[in-house]
Image (cartoon, grey):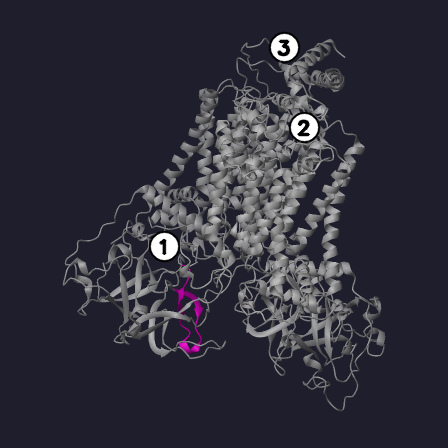
Amino acid sequence: MAGTGKLRQRVPVSGRANFEYDRIQEEEHTDDVYQNPNNRHPIEKILETDKASVVVVAVLTALAFALRFYKINHPDQVVFDEVHFGKFASYYILGEYYFDVHPPFAKLLFGLAGWFSGFDGHFQFENIGDSYTQNHVPYVGMRALPAILGSLTVPVVYAIMKQSGYSTVIAAFSAAIILFDNAHIAQSRLILLDATLIFFMSLTIYAYVRFQKLRYREFTSEWFGWLFATGIFMACTWGSKVNGVLTVATVGVAVLIDLWGILDYKKSPSMDYFWKHFAARAIGLIVVPFIIYLSFFWVHFALLPTSGTGDSFMSPAFQETLAGNEMLLSAQEIRYYDTVTIRHKDTKVYLHSHVERYPLKYDDGRISSQGQQVTGYGHADENNNWQIIPTKALPETGRGRIVRHNDMIQLLHVNTDTVLLTHDVASPLMPTNQEFTTWPRDDTSRFNETLFQLSLTDAHDGEAWKSKSGYFRLIHGQTRVSMWTHTKQLPEWAFRQQEINGNKNPSEKTATWFVEDIVADETGEDPKERTGHQPPKVPKKMNFFRKFGELQLLMLQHNAGLTASHPYASGPLNWPFLIAGISFWTENDPQKQIYLIGNLVGWWTCVVALSIYVGILGADLLARRRNNDPIPEPVRNRLWNSTGFFFVVWAVHYAPFFLMNRQLFIHHYLASHLASALIAGAVLQFILSETINYPISVEAPTMRRHKRQYVDIGLKGPIIFALFCIAMFSMFVFLAPLTYGTPGLTGDQVNGKRLLSSWTLHFAAKKTAEVVP
Amino acid sequence: MNPGGRAVAVDFVEDEFEEIGYPETLPTYSPHMDESAAARRRLGKGKPEGAEEKVWYDDEDDYKAPSVRSISGGRPAQLALPPPTTLREFIFQNMPSIPPLVYTLLACYTRFHRIGLSATVVWDEAHFGKFASHYLKREFYFDVHPPLGKMLVGLAGLLSGYNGGFDFKSGADYPPEVPYVAMRVMLATFGVGMVPLGWFTAIELGMSQWAAHLVALMVLFDVGWLCISRFILLDSMLLFFTFLTVFCLSKFHNQQSHPFDFDWWTWLAMTGISIGLVTSVKMVGLFVTALVGIYTLQDLWDKFGDLHLTPREQAKHWGARVLCLIIIPILVFMATFKIHFMILNHSGPGDAQMSSLFQANLYGNDFHNNPLEIAIGSKVTIKNMAFGGGLLHSHVQTYPTGSNQQQVTCYHYKDENNEFWFWPGWDQKDTVWDPKYGSHDPNDEEVRFLKHLDVVRLVHVPTTRNIHSHTIPAPVTKANWEVSGYGNATIGDVQDHWVVEVLGDVVRGDVNRYLEPKSATVDPRARIHALTTRLRFRHQVLGCYLSAGRTSLPQWGFKQIEVSCAKEEAGSKPAEGTIWNVESHWNTKLPPAARSLSRSPFLTDFIHLNIAMMTSNNALVPDPDKEDLLASKPWEWPFLSVGLRMCGWGDSQIKYYLMGNPIIWWGGSISLIIAAFVSVGLVVRRQRYGGGRGTRKPAPNSLNGDSGRNGAALASRPGDGLTQREWAQFWHVTRIAGGGWILHYLPFLIMGRVTYIHHYLPTLYFAVLMFAHLLDYFVFQVPSTASASLQAVPTSSISLSDLSSIPKIIRTFRSLPRITRIKVYVFSITVSAIFGTFWWFRAVAWGIEGPVRDTWGLAWRENWNIYH
């Protein structure tokens, strides 16, 4: 048996060895060619010097500033989401609390920019098209911030490529894709968050690349420096916009892959070594960023001490920390026999009843109880008054008369002297829900059906019920339905008021109500003076972490809730191909418009590059599976590890959008577009050259020296780059009127700019429909 | 060859001789596969043993040769036994068949016990019973599910003598002539079949006998599976075929060592057939298909890296999979539809879902009484010709957005709101017609036939509103213009004008003739025919085309299909949704045209019906305005947070509550979580320790009948603490059970459709397999140290047979090694817990009689609405 085994085993082994030998031979041969850096093409040699690199960066940066600042004062009107972000900046200046789904860092920067440029916060950015000049808003100063960050993104992209070992021309190529891109430019010239997001995202990539290059010099101060830099930039990215969390995920994925390698028993001698690595990353990439992220919110809360538009999003406890908040000023404990008005939290209607009764039979043939109508009514009215009747013995005076959480109460409709009741009869509009009606107070035959349990939101046992701040659900004692209302109106017989019914879902969030006002107390007096003289109320304190937690939760909920359709929303699949853009702003008279759309040449180049890249990886996988090595080892490493990282950046910033239900816009792709520009550079280098600059990692003293390789793309690199830049620039100039919003275009010109039929540009000349004769 | 290579070869042989004693007889072994392990050893040979090795970093990872899975999990091959010579031998050889037999009999008992107790239509019997009636009456109906399951229900009805006359109203009592008990029993037989399938699947997956018992018992005693199998529903069939697919797949896996054998082909083809069957019952079957697909892709990827296979063999492997796993299932799926169409050859409630041509060929259809050629003044219904298209429809309800005018939709059922008149445009009013259809100006006796490029108004018959379009975006497809019903017989404007464009004719072809407008009135060949002529309606003012997409309107439009006016680039190909044909046609002035139409091709009908099914399935989204008490969310399933009342809850009714056996559901879900952790742990350990440390001794005698020598051989890579056999076995079952569970669960999280707890029932199977698998891995397959005594007493004889000699069992038990006793304890505790909870909850599946309060202690969780 051993004999046959031996024979059988030997053949492949020897075959393998031969193969190995051939491979080494081949590689050594290629190594020879590129071993000597002086053998390279003279152009390449010049371009690879530091001086040349500085010159290239300087030119790129200067161009970037020029393109982004060109006519930055135009239009002098509120454009697209400047409505939101400009407003938020003014809130920071005024100190009024607001609520938004995005974290505050970028908005804080805008606030700062506005403050620097002398904006006093009086302008509210109410509508798209409101004039800045008429309102004396220093908007150029505010727009300069994203323009600067957007411009600086270009040299950062260059640096990423350069640091990853690509030659100068290639790095400039990637930078040019961003430099001449209409979408990036349009997005950076306005008061929008994306420029900040993308700038810090590119910095994060840069810092991580630097960190990775130091991997053989682990635990040196440089290494730690770039590790923390990654963490800090990452926190800034995340702090700019919710989407920044994808950058965090990217770094997370990369770190996991990295740690997985370190875990390998062949690489690390002991487990301690692994844990040291793990701890360093945990501190640098989790603890530090989180502290920074928290600090953004700390500043946010600190800058917004007074009541503002965001109050109503927050919990009562939170609202009471804001100066001037109505809830803080007028919340009062409610006592039995108080007459109150009750309002629905979401739709803001009052709980209302009137003498009219439900019709016996509805249009769909169902039968009602024909009881007195209970409806939701939007306006103040005598019929909104309800008195709280106890179901237990009360002490004569004192705090025992306060209504508390989980008390069983009756609600007496004061004008008709009837009590609120619900029973197992279908409501007028919804057969699944229970009808609400009232019942004469003195008729005790249905007493049990008139009992309601008062359930305060987030309350502890025995908590007092307060007006304004005490959100509650009213749960029917017998059938356990909650009093609920929805925006549907009842027909004419109920004067088109809102339906109120009993919702059977025990955890329905929208079944929340609050007491708007205490109209009268037991004696019919105004209860305001009940508690005697009160000192002026000061805002309460609340733990920062509780505030932070509450706000985070709300941001998540609202972000997921942005599902309403929007005419310019588009699906993720359309983005890389530039199928549709967004109309940011239009002006009728000279037919000007800003339309967010990318540079067709650049974006499609990126798409092609991505598909080539995926193709190369696929082919390499298949070939390796069959034991072929078509790509030299160092080149393959660069493709898999360095470009692979860019690919992860692209995929992680792109794929999650496919799973999201919220409305999506093409500017969500900008981060991925930047990553695809990096990939495009890498692919171009792969095509032009058989080698790469290698190795690029900083060497450790203990390391075995690797034979150096140098890339040489010679003259063809600069030529291709120049041609590409010309194409990019022409396309850029062609689309520039849509990007800068000037000059105005005639209808036919607009049609000419409509390169893809799916672009919904304004002011297009009517195509006369061709009628078939 | 270089000298170094030769030295290496010598080392290698020595090494191999000492440690890797692969016997050739081991069926799962293939000779080239240990090459990578051997190669690794060869590389390390140059360094002295024990010397600390300085790791040299390079800028690259070291090159790894493609790793080929060396030993796959699954059931180890059994020696074929010689034919029995004595009765004793025969019995002995067939001993392993006894447990599944017993379980099957038990399953018959649990499934059939009191099956006819509730003589009312329970839950979805209302649907599926009705569909069975349609089959028996041979009426065409429409439903979102593929037809196989319902045909089997129909078959059950046929076999039990049901005449199809009952309408299966929900909650109604069965009349005496409906043999509902027989029908239920036939369908419950699929539920019985699940139990032996569970047993044999466990065996084929390479689980121990203990685990196989567990799987069978869990399938037997889950009240959810039990309950759902006892009614006239599709779920028992769906479950049975899902189980069958997993069984065939694991059976096929075990044939991998001898490809292209008869058995190999059989089980590959069987897998394909069962995929086809499961998908033909419900589309959920696609999930188990995905499991087979992923398994196959991985398998082929392994084969692709196997350099010892010739290209011819590679191609054969690929070809076999394409044939058996793609072509056969599709053929099976299509065959069910073919039979479906063959049976249902009478007109019925589902007609309107299909193309006009298809309907015309159904018996009982009155299309042949209709006049053939359309004229101005004809009353018609207009059918969209796109796959899954409906009838143009309007109703008194108005759009809540846009113009707030009357809604115009596409509707898939016949009612009089689908009827329209072709009237001339407002400008021609004086010359022609009285608004009463058919009767017209007596002076104008001449019939004006409709022709290409005529301008008409489409007037909705019940409301007399004109189909109208204007520059208001459509409610859903904002890019198109809204189409609404506007005005009446006297009020209207040019926005009501539509230009009729003829594209061609399905039967007569030839477009060009229709494009000659002048000859149309005279030339009968140029006239527009009902059913077959393909028409478009261009809005005269806006130039857009009347179009129905696949988008449904929200609840205010009753989820009907949106109709809009689609802008079209000049010269582009006509979009499918803009093409219409006239379906029903009434005109008293014209003679009925008897004619025989050619059949619509099967493939067209097949695609048409499938698209219609998909469209209505997608429309089953939860309605935010209406709370569905029965619906539940996927995350409520694994831990059984909800149950479902299957019928009315009155005191006198027999009540059924769809829930699961909590021990099985919770146990399954917990084991999935544990399995996730264990998997991660194992992978990390392999990465960390590679071939270094062994914690678990090689199994000289595992329960699976590995011979001692094989066991030792397989233990040659103890680095991560597992033998290769254990490693492979763990991953094989984990990926089938875990992968299957994920594939059956995640889609429900993503899809927007309304979901119910019974959607989890196929998923549960994979949780059950994982449950048994983990117990197997941690307890039952742990090799015992003193294996001899274990061998002496076969495990099956302890648990089931030999009940007569209890003292002997106790004695034997005491003499067992500790690990074996632990196994017995674990097994007995699990089984008693499963059986105990089953017995506790048996009433929910067998029917709760009398007031529900009398059955005590069922609400283990707050959300189970058994009592309130």
**Res B248 → quadrant:** top right
The answer to which of marks 3 and 2 sits earlier in the sequence is: 3
Image spot of residue B561 (x, y percent): 62, 65
Numbered disc 2: secondary structure:
loop
Q: Chain of mark 1?
A: A
Relative to A243, say whether A758 is above or below: below
Position of the N terminus of chain B by quadrant: top right
Q: Which residue is mark 1?
A: A309
Distance between the alpha carbons at the discs numbered 3 and 2: 25 Å
Q: What are the residue bounds of the magenta stretch?
A: A484-505
Residue closer to the observer: B160 or A679: B160
Numbered disc 1: secondary structure:
loop
Residue closer to the observer: A128 or A395: A395
Distance between the alpha carbons at the discs numbered 2 and 1: 63 Å
Mark 2 vs mark 1: give the one in front.
2
Task: Decide if residue B432 is on the left or right side of residue A269.
Answer: right
Residue type at numbered disc 2: Val
Mark 1 vs mark 3: give the one in front.
3
Residue closer to the observer: A707 or A405: A405
Mark 3 vs mark 2: give the one in front.
2
Residue closer to the observer: A453 or B462: A453
Q: Do labels 3 and 2 touch, CB within 8 Å?
A: no
Image spot of residue B818 (x, y percent): 48, 27
Task: Decide if residue A273 is on the left or right side of residue A682.
Answer: left
Discs 3, 2: same chain: yes
Q: Which residue is mark 3?
A: B46
Q: Is residue A491 part of the magenta span, yes or no? A: yes
